[in-house]
Image (spheres, rainbow, N blue to C red):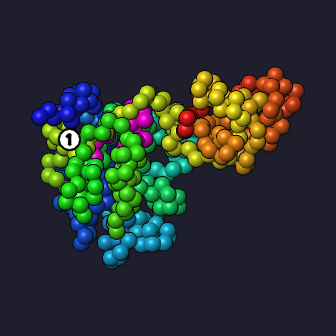
Amino acid sequence: MTNTQAVHKAAILPTARRVVIKIGSTILSDGRGFAVDRLNRLVGEICDLGDRQIVAVTSGAVAVGMARLGLEARPRSVPQRQAAAAVGQIGLMAMYEQHFAKRGKTVAQLLLTHDDLANRRRYINARHTFEELLQAGTLPVVNENDTVAVEEFLNFGDNDNLSALVATLIGADLLVILSDVAGLHTGNPSTDPEAKRISVVETIDSQIRSHVADDNDTVGTGGMASKLRAAEKASAAGIPCVIADGLTPGVLAKVFDPNSDEGTLILAQGDKLSRRKHWIAHTLQPTGSITLDDGAIAAVTKSKRSLLPKGILAATGTFEAGDCIACLTKEGTEVARGLTNYGHSDIEKIRGQHSTAIQEILGYKLGDEVIHRDDLILTST
């Protein structure tokens, strides 16, 4: 029987020099506290990967803080979780530094929030920082800045998502998500003895999504569904992803063994999005919306053209030029999103008008397009 994962690995691994490895909370916590032995093992496995440029995205700050504060259950309120993260972050990074230093490797700590990645200037600055660290041979260890960012705990709050965004940010060749399960299965392997591991996913479709559920655990925040969403974001940027069991000794050697069938390999899908378009599609949240007529929808979705004011029926919400806005049908279905050249009040003035009238109506003109096609992402066709 042909090892289909090996076939795909043969094409992926030789050029996988820059890799993001996400280490989950369930790996770094053994139920009694922080599992130092597991961290030490994984640090050794990372160092054994040779001259690859590695970025580690780690969970565990809250778990370490829980142990230090004597908490048995994950805190429910945001302030309690932030307090646990504040206590745990120091110890977590100290352990990373200690175990990498034993192997002669220097690490750097980077704390990111959603705002850091949603702001284009800070996004680019973060990318430059990563580049400098990697070129210097330093291993960046990334975590969410849990102590100050409320939204991380509410809806951005799993490092699976962060790992995909970091992979795109640095132009990674591969994303590896380590969890406490051996990849994606046809069912929940903890409750379904008939569940089988899926070796390769070529396309993330409704059938693949039906195999997972949002089943968060008591220590981490992201179940298998969040890992699949992260893999989908990475694959949209042309980055393949492996989901594997980080509790298995030697797991990284197996992931990078071209002849080994380990975990689930999710292939890069479709055309590779530019970093800018991936940033618009997966990092930004729309601050408002505009409703389009049928002609504008066809121009945007089928002809891949820029959005002109003539086809806009209405603007909803308060947004400024440069913000991300959603493009809706008359029924309210989102078909695209992008960066607007005009704020909501100006769009209300020019909607339904030809582009040649913009200067006369507003007294200025930033362009013929409300959203240029280079700043436009289709979300539904």
Q: Residue furthest left?
A: 1
Residue at 34%, 65% in the rendered image: 217
Graded by Cα atoms within 10 Å as few (under 14), some (14 to 19) or many (20 or more), the crowding at tag 1 reads many
Is 11 left or right of 55, judged from the image as shown? left
Residue at 33%, 52% in the rendered image: 211
List x then y, in percent, for residue 278.
49, 36
Relative height, residue 353 to residue 327 (above, below): above
In the picture, residue 4 is in which quadrant? top left
* Residue 100 visible in image: no
Question: What's the magenta region?
Answer: 230-246
Q: In this orientation, which residue lies closer to the viewer: 111 or 107?
A: 111
* Residue 353 visible in image: yes
Q: In this orientation, which residue lies closer to the viewer: 326 or 146?
A: 326
Residue at 55%, 49% in the rendered image: 115
| Circle 1 SS class | helix
Residue 4 magenta-drawn? no
In the picture, residue 85 is in which quadrant? bottom left
Q: Amino acid at mark 1?
A: Val
Residue at 11%, 34% in the rendered image: 1
Q: In this orientation, which residue lies closer to the viewer: 277 or 181?
A: 181
In the picture, residue 171 is in which quadrant? top left
Is 363 left or right of 203, judged from the image as shown? right
The quarter of the image holding the C terminus is top right
Is 221 left or right of 248, judged from the image as shown? right
Is 162 left or right of 299, judged from the image as shown? left
Residue that carries the numbered disc 1 in the rendered image: 255
| Labels in figure, total | 1
Residue 236 magenta-drawn? yes
Q: In this orientation, which residue lies closer to the viewer: 312 or 65?
A: 312
List x then y, in percent, for residue 335.
60, 38
List x then y, in percent, for residue 29.
26, 64
